[in-house]
Structure formats: C-alpha cells, structure tokens
Image (cartoon, rainbow, N blue to C red):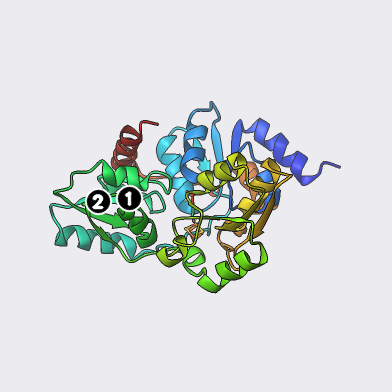
Amino acid sequence: MEDIVDEILRLKRERKAVILAHVYQPEEIQEIADFSGDSFALSRKAAATDAEVIVFCGVRFMAETANILSPDKITLLPAADAGCQMFDDTLEPAVRQMKAEHPDALLVSYVNTPASVKAMSDVCCTSSNAAAVVNSLPKDKEILFVPDENLGSFAMEKCPGHKVICWHGGCPIHQALKREEIEAAKAAHPGALVLMHPECRKELRDLADYVGSTTGIIKYAVESPAQEFIIATEQGVMYELTERCPEKKFYMASRRMLCVNMKKTNLEKVRDALKTLEPRVIVPPEIREKATAALQRMLQITGK
Ligand code: 13P
Ligand code: SF4
C-alpha cells in the first residue's frame, strides 16, 4: 500500500507542485520539502520554478508573500489557521493611524506582516536586511518600523542618525527568552557560541556571539570553525543545523522556543491540500500590486 509520503510525492508530480517548508516546520515536513529556508527566500525560489502550485508549509503571511510573487500559481497553505502571533487584525488600523500621525514619514514593514500592511509600506525588509534597508533611507525623514520593535531596535543600532519610530510589536516566542536561560546554557556549555535571532530582546542580544536571521544562523554555524552552539530561535532550525553539520553540537537556549502556529502543518494536511487544491491563499490584485512595489524596493536596495 502507498504510504502517505509516497502519496504526497505522487500528488506533487500530478499537480506540478513545489513544496516549501520554513525552517521552523516539523521535521517530517522539512524532510519532504523541495526547498526549506526563510520565508522570503522560499517565495523567491518558488517564483523561479515552473511549478503550477505552491504548497507553503509555514504561516499565512509567508503564503501571502509567495502568492504576491507568483500570482499565476495556485498558492496553498495546508494549515489554514496558522497565523503569526507577532501581529493580529489590529495591526492594519494601527499602522494607518501611525501614518496619519506622521504624514511625511517612510514606512518600513518587516515581511512578517499581512499583505495589506505591505501594500501601505514604502519598503519591506527581512530579518537579514533590516539594517541595510533603514540605512538606505534619508536621515532627514522619520521612519516608521512595523511590527517588530526588537528587529527595529537591532536595525537602529546599526544605523545611528536615523530617526526610527518602532511599533510596539514582537514575537512572543523570541521575546520570552530569559537572561537566566542564556546564562544557564552558557554555564552548561562554556565553549559554545550563542547564535540568536534579532527578534530577541536587546538585553539578550547583547549576550550573543552572533545575531542574525534563520538563514544567517545556519550559515554562521556551517562556516564557523567552532563545534558547539547555543541556538536562540525557534527549535525547528535544529533539523537543518544537524543535517548540515552532523559533527557539530547544538543546544537550544530554551525549550520554550516553540511556535505553535508553525507546528500546525502535518503530512495529512499537505496531502489533503494537494488532493483538493485547498485551502488557497489569494492576495487581491490591488493589494498585490502595491505590496509588490514595496518588496521590489527592498530588492533594489539589497541588490539581491
Ligand atoms: P526568518 O525570516 O529569519 O526565517 O524568521 C521568520 C520568523 O518567523 C521569525 O520568527
Ligand atoms: Fe510569528 Fe514568532 Fe511564529 Fe515567527 S516564530 S511565525 S514571528 S509567532
């Protein structure tokens, strides 16, 4: 009898689909994916394929970005209720209000936002390029940064002289990391380097040896001559880290770093999405056009 993985692979071929998995996804999902990585890189990879269907194993804003970059492909989000706890429906009206209060300011939005907020933005950024994006903007203009104040403050540290106003949002999983947890991990593994996501609070970032996006953390661990690392981001990255560096040792900074929304995807949902071509994510054309412009401005700045 055909097992579920074989069934998914067969359906994938029949549907001419590509399966994307964010590095926070459960292991069983990362194992079957065509590509794994960070959300924006995955959306770009999918856009460059001739697949007709994108299966985005991640959370809603990620599938929206994939659909913005590939409007002619069907975009499926197997875990239809997977949101991001960094923001909720109040973000869009709050950003509108912020813009009204600062009419001359430029709006920079992290890709972890709904498409409607990207559409209001002058430029988007990722956790890899937030500082480069802010730095490219004029110093005499106010900059509104949404929704993650930790990523905003990380960018500001690298861009002295820029006037940045951060919205008070954040990722509960990264923000919850405690100083005592890092100190305990360092005490238990004195030779290990601490690799941390910029969504963590500044007082914690100051204890890290490297701060960067999930892509940056993985690249750092692969290229570093060090053999032991304390990982301060969502625990899903452990799969890619141990796959890429089987000889190195990785320790989670905290066992609480688990994103429940990222764990809503399972093999059954992926199979059912391929079978039924549902649940779909469709960004309406008027929002898509404006959001595309903000994403393209980011690409012009970073040159990638
Ligand atoms: P990356 O863009 O660094 O993969 O992060 C995505 C995310 O959701 C962080 O919490
Ligand atoms: Fe959102 Fe945080 Fe989960 Fe990333 S880890 S998807 S920012 S809630």
Q: What residue type is labelled 1?
A: Lys
Position of 180 relative to 14 (above/below): below
Give the amino acid at mark 2: Leu
Residue 257 circle label = none
Q: Is mark 2 within 8 Å of ligand 2?
A: no
Q: Which residue is tagged 2? A: 107
Left or right: 110 in relation to 220: left
Q: Where is residue 91 in the image (x, y as percent from the top left)?
A: 33, 62
**Looking at the image, which residue is at 59% across and 57% down?**
231
Judging from the image, what secondary structure is the residue with disc 1 in?
helix
Q: Which of 142 and 202 is in front in this view?
A: 202
**Residue 128 vs residue 30, the one in the foreground:** 128
| Disc 2, SS | strand
> Residue beneath label 1, please?
158
Residue nearer the viewer, 161 or 172: 161
- The 10 Å Cα crowd at callout 2, few under 14, some 14 to 19, many 20 or more, is many
Vertical position of residue 161 compared to residue 165: above or below = above
Pointer 1 local density, CA inside 10 Å: few below 14, some 14–19, many at least 20: some
Residue at image location 23% in from the left, 59% down from the top: 96
Looking at this rendering, what residue extends furthest in the front direction? Answer: 191
Query: Disc 2 and disc 1: Cα gap in Å?
Result: 18 Å
